[in-house]
Image (cartoon, helix red, strand yellow):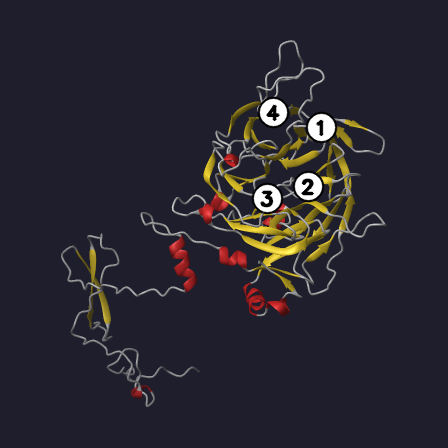
Amino acid sequence: MLPSPSSSPPQVLHERTNLIVTPIQTRLSFALPTPPRDTPRVFASSSAGLSKKRKHNFSTDPAGNPEFVQEVDSDGDVEMEDVTPRPRARQYTPFHKVMRRTIAAPGRRREDFSTRAILQSFISSNKSDIYKCQSSDVDVYLTPPYACSYTKSAKNGGVPILAVATEQGTVHLVNTSRRKDWYPGPPQTTLQVHQNGIFDVKWNNDDTLLATGSGDQSTHITCVTKEIVTCALRGHTSTVKCVTWDPSNTNLLSTGGRDGTICLWDLRVAGTKDEDGPNVLKPVISIPGAHEDSTWKVRRRGKKVPAPRSITSLLYPEIGNYGLVSSGSFDGVIKHWDLRLPTKRKGSVKPKPPANLFSSADDPTTLHGSRRPRAIVRLTPGTGLSSGLVFGLGADSRVHVYDAVSLNPLPMSYSHRNMQTNSFYVGLTLSHCGRWLATGSGAVGKSTQGSAFLYDVGNVTRQTNPAYSQEGVQLIGQQGEVGAVDWADNMLASCADDGTVRVWRPDVEIYRECIRDPEKSRWDWSWHS
């Protein structure tokens, strides 16, 4: 049988909130005092816009329970207590202070912020960051790499797979993840794509196909998963110098050659296929003499005809889906082509070449004291902080900046006293964030060491920032000319004539050790000069 409930009166609380009279609790001095019972307690309304308010009356319940709460609706004025919160001063770390200065409030003058100190911290290990391009010839140990390209996934933080194209027509697929000293790393995949040198290599949008332009006057499309050549694109009469994929369609790409012709290809078009050979395709659109002078006339027999003006670089602009931008080997003028369906000539089946919508109004290579125009060796589109711009590496050893809409050059450029880019093998690349620009360079004077150069272009659009006067960071660590360069997430790959590929990464702690003791560190590391 259950015991009957106790008839003793309930335990009386102490004159403090939620405090029971016990020997231990009575010694606590931090308890809050309970307000008198005869004083009504008023709560502030949670919304200032409410016209109908409730008043809480604290009185004794008819049943005898103290602290009985009675709610009364009232449309009249009720005495409210105004509570004003006191703002607390926010503590900012040094990083937050820098970011607040970088991203200022609207209407406030934005201050220029340079990341040159980060570029100076790029280092490369002599034990784990060097990859060698093995030669397929038994009489030669190494072969020089001509081009390199990271996958789209590597640029977005994925596994850094680098495709390195060599002088012997081979492509090495290298995993450039950080590894231990002297550790060989994962095995490389070698593809024999051409029987001649490869001058450009590019991944498609989903990293399944590789396009390689070669000195055998053709471009091959290689399936990486099956390790076979699926298509051979033949339409040039000379070396294929540059290749670029259409970012909006994985089946379209463009090539430029030393013959001065731009060819557009569609992999969906049926071609001819030989026995045990790839599918051979012809260009769907050709632009012959893309950078020739329109006023040039054919010379008479017996006169020497000048060599065609090569196509050095191609890119698809971010504005418009039917355009193509090209640069040539004669001057610093870049052109924009309209790739929409051209009209046919009268009495001819072949359509007219695409129209040149507009070109650069000025040649930036003649604005710095040069007596003749110089070529634009490479083009790269801006992205992120540099969106809306086009960067062009000139043969005058300067990086010129163009407006992506009008293609007119801007009054600024980037250069270094030791940068030499008068070779058509030197590359140019922009990081995925759009802030860091990297170029290759040849050896200067009697020196046999080539270099890679880094520039901070994040403030290029600021009128108050003297971008033309900011000197780049020189990375020294290879022999011969440093040609192809490419960015991945938080790393840079550079190819040199000594048959090696170096990977550079930012590391402040190791860089400080190299500065403190350069004689000891130079055996293990390479860093900027």
Q: Residues within 10 Å of mark 2 (few under 14, many from 20)?
A: many
Seen in the picture, residue 524 relative to 214 is either above or below; the reply is: below
* Three-letter code for the amino acid on which mark 3 is drawn: Leu
The extreme bottom residue here reads 23
Q: Residues within 10 Å of mark 4 (few under 14, many from 20)?
A: some
Whichever of callouts 4 and 3 sits on the residue coming sooner in the sequence is 4
Q: Nearer the viewer, residue 127 or 421?
A: 421
Q: Of the residues tagged 3 and 2, which is closer to the observer? A: 3
Q: Which residue is mark 4?
A: 292
* Three-letter code for the amino acid on which mark 4 is drawn: Glu
Q: Which residue is mark 1?
A: 236
| Distance between mark 4 and mark 3 Cα atoms | 24 Å
Q: Residue at x 71, y 55 (%)?
A: 131
Residue contact at pointers 4 and 3, CB within 8 angstroms? no
* Three-letter code for the amino acid on which mark 1 is drawn: His
Q: Is residue 31 visible?
A: yes
Q: Of the residues tagged 1 and 4, which is closer to the observer? A: 4
Q: Which residue is mark 3?
A: 428
Whichever of callouts 1 and 4 sits on the residue coming sooner in the sequence is 1
- Judged from the image, the secondary structure of the residue bearing numbered disc 2 is strand
The numbered mark at residue 201 is 2
* Three-letter code for the amino acid on which mark 2 is drawn: Val
